[in-house]
Amino acid sequence: MRFLLIIFFLATTGLRAQSADSVEVEIARGDTLQIGTVETAFFKHLDMYKKTRWTGTEPAYDTASGEGFFKSFFATGDFDVAELPKAYTGRKFVVLGVEVLQNKNTGQPMNVLYLRGDLPHTVIWVDFDQAFESGELRLPD
């Protein structure tokens, strides 16, 4: 089994992943990650959000670092959300941003990253730690 050490750095808005069988890698805005595998029809730790209504009052975010992406995309408007289907296995997506949010169920910090979806106005929301540990997300081949 592969164990990952995940460290979040607010100053660089990146995540670092390290395992016993690999070198440490920093993951930040603009990098590419690959969707892993899942045994069921849908991924458990990846969701597809499609913004269906913009209010025009969305706060700006730092497009160079990705900082503030959550507030910019999710703070206003309406969304359709669905679990990411198994058909996305093996596909590669660009990281739009990474943030530490508070898990509303546990109150604990949660590392989240956002991948640019393949359809207009879509984002793939990733519970980073859980997705890497389960093999649902990985570094590209």
Image (spheres, rainbow, N blue to C red):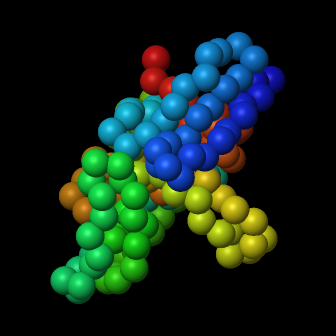
| Image coordinates for residue 93, horizontal then vertical, percent | 36, 39
Q: What residue occupies the far top of the structure in this picture?
A: 21
Residue 51 seen in render = no
| Image coordinates for residue 21, horizontal then vertical, percent | 71, 13
Q: What residue occupies the far front of the structure in this picture?
A: 11
Which of the 4 image quarters holds residue 123?
Answer: bottom left
Is residue 123 rendered to the left or right of residue 39? left
Residue 52 seen in render = yes
Q: Residue at x 78, y 71 (%)?
A: 106
| Image coordinates for residue 102, horizontal then vertical, percent | 65, 69
The residue nearer to you, when weighing 40 against 99, is 99
Against 67, is 5 above or below? above
**Quadrant including the N terminus:** top right
Q: Residue at x 57, y 46 (%)?
A: 9
Q: Residue at x 61, y 53 (%)?
A: 111
Which of the 4 image quarters holds residue 36?
Answer: top right
